[in-house]
Amino acid sequence: MTKKNDKWGINTRLAHSGNNPRDFFGFVNPPVVHGSTVLYPDAGTMAARGQKYTYGTRGTPTTDALEAAIDELEGSAGTILVPSGLAAVTVPLLAFASAGDHVLIVDSVYHPTRHFADNMLKRLGIDVEYYAPHVGAGIKALLRPNTKIVFTESPASNTFEMQDIPAIAKVARAAGAVVMMDNTWATPLYFKPLDHGVDISIHAATKYPAGHSDVLLGTVSANEACWPRLREAFDALGCCAAPDDVYQVLRGLRTMGVRLEHHSKSALDIARWLEGQPGVARVLHPALPSHPDHALWKRDFSGSSGVFSIVLAGGGQKQAHAFLDALKIFGLGYSWGGFESLAVPVFLGDRTVSTRYEGPLIRLQIGLEDVADIKADLTAGLAAAASA
Ligand SMILES: Cc1ncc(COP(=O)(O)O)c(C=O)c1O
């Protein structure tokens, strides 16, 4: 940051964090450094690796700028940038789990996280166990002497249960486990994991930080205690992010506050409205007072983003497909956090802790389009589901 000021509001910090324009002749943005080789002035400097930049995988002025901006938002000791949000999940798991360890993962986790755990981690001799999202301090009963990681995600992927992160973190850390959180939904603007006892905060920067459905990137931020091991694993794995993608995410960060505010406001308006629409049994959005975990969300989070799910009132795949096929503004596609609205049918076949729903679940990402147009689109979808 140029002239650090702790009293600055979030949009001021988003606009000015990361690089110092004076470092590059006053240009507002940092250069996009495409580089593998870095030259040394002489053999002695080379032998000692005695300069700031040593090789492309180890950092550039572009990665430094984004890492510094993320550290400032997260309050972390260090951040690594990896090529996707999924890599932001897998790299810290690989960094902290060894053969013979036990790892606890929330049952309502992002499905590819589960796939990685069930395949790679188990193959490496790591014992993976899933726990119920509402476990809270009850996680104590599941901790074993060899539990090394407790992996959380709140709200839950697709079903939006809230976890009591401070309670879980307190018990898990007291037992010596590293607590990780996939905080992609809230972004560090609406929840700062490290302030609530989490050791490692994970983000798919692909979503709100990038914001335009055209970049894949992940960030992993650690507290002082966990930073050296995380950085060591990152260096060992060589999974560094590409310079153009890093730059795009830094660019996205500048407007993330205003975009998020719009996503949040529109999503809440639409979620409230959907609660009164025929054909909708339930709206799963933690910022709605009707949500069973609303009190937990209100206690810990300072805002809500633009993704939530609806439960259709009865029916099955036929009704879900009729709903989705009638949508004209919503695209049918994975991911979220971009400027455009998206809808996906929710798959829950991987869950072991199951909740009964009245009908099919549809996840909605509310984009930056006009709310009246989005509502009209959803009305058409609900009408199509009703007559399917
Ligand atoms: C909660 C969560 N974490 C991680 C990811 C992975 O991000 P990416 O698509 O960049 O791999 C996603 C993607 O949908 C996600 O929803």
Image (cartoon, rainbow, N blue to C red):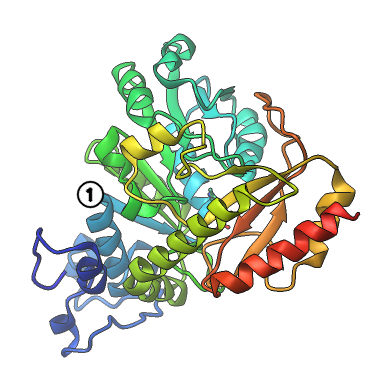
Give me the residue at 48% from left, 41% from top: 286
Image quadrant where one finds the N terminus: bottom left
Residue neighbourhood size for the residue with mark 1, other residues' Cα within 10 Å, grouped as few (<14), some (14–19), many (≥20)? some
Look at label 1 and name its amino acid: Gly
Give the x, y percent position of residue 122. 63, 28
Question: In the figure, residue 246 lies in which quadrant?
Answer: bottom left
User: Is disc 1 placed on a helix, strand or loop?
Assistant: loop
Compared with 69, 301 (above or below) is above
Give me the residue at 49% from left, 40% from top: 155
Give me the residue at 62% from left, 40% from top: 116
Q: Can residue 327 be seen here?
A: yes
| Camera-side residue of 159 and 17 | 159
Image quadrant where one finds the C terminus: bottom right
Give me the residue at 42% from left, 51% from top: 304
Residue 325 located left or right of residue 334: right
Residue position marked by numbered label 1 in the rendering = 75
Residue 316 located left or right of residue 337: right
| Camera-side residue of 184 and 382 | 382
Residue 141 located left or right of residue 323: left
Compared with 67, 346 (above or below) is above
Compared with 132, 306 (above or below) is below
